[in-house]
Image (cartoon, grey):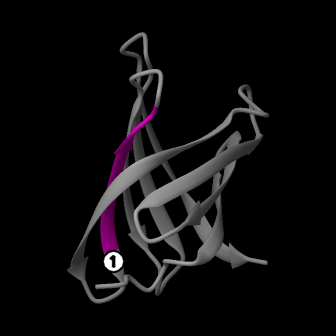
Amino acid sequence: MAFEFVGKTYRFDYDGFVAEDHFSQDEVHFEVVGGPITGLRGSARYTAREVAKGIYAISWQEADGSTVVHVDNFTDGVSLSYFTDASSNFYQMHGTLSAIG
């Protein structure tokens, strides 16, 4: 099953942090383009589940052990992101998402 976001790139704009994520069928390719870790990029296998029409829970683990969980509303352009870095610091972010490219 292909999710509606597969094959597309999205800009996630949170307060002080901006990332661009491209979703293939089973991998997310990400790059931080704004904020304190600008330039960080990588890819990871993700899992996704539609929780309501146009709203998805998407999660992945990065190579350094960091974990990311998004709850993305692709209909309304709203994103919640929960991030635990490799040092176990936990961040909660709320912002917007928009298709680019």
What secondary structure is marked by label 1?
Answer: strand
Q: Nearer the viewer, residue 54 or 26?
A: 26
Q: Does the magenta portion include 5?
A: no
Identify which amino acid the numbered label 1 is placed on.
Ile
Residue located at (56% from left, 58% from top): 95
Residue 83, compared with residue 46, is above or below; it is: above
Residue 68, compared with residue 49, is above or below; it is: above
Image quadrant where one finds the N terminus: bottom left
Magenta span? 56-62
Q: Main secondary structure of the magenta part?
A: strand
Residue located at (45% from left, 34% from top): 62
Q: Quadrant of residue 57?
A: bottom left
Q: x and y percent of residue 77 in the render?
A: 54, 76
Residue located at (67% from left, 41% from top): 17
Residue located at (59% from left, 53% from top): 29
Q: x and y percent of residue 39 in the render?
A: 78, 34
Judging by the rendered image, the residue that carries numbered circle 1 is 55
Image quadrant where one finds the C terminus: bottom right
- Judged from this view, the residue extending furthest toward the top is 87
Q: x and y percent of residue 60 in the render?
A: 36, 45
Q: Does the magenta portion include 61?
A: yes
Residue 55, compared with residue 69, is above or below; it is: below
87 with respect to 100 (left or right): left
Q: x and y percent of residue 52 in the render?
A: 23, 83
61 with respect to 11 (left or right): left
Alpha-carbon neighbours of circle 1 within 10 Å: few (<14), some, or many (≥20)? some
Q: Nearer the viewer, residue 28 or 52?
A: 28
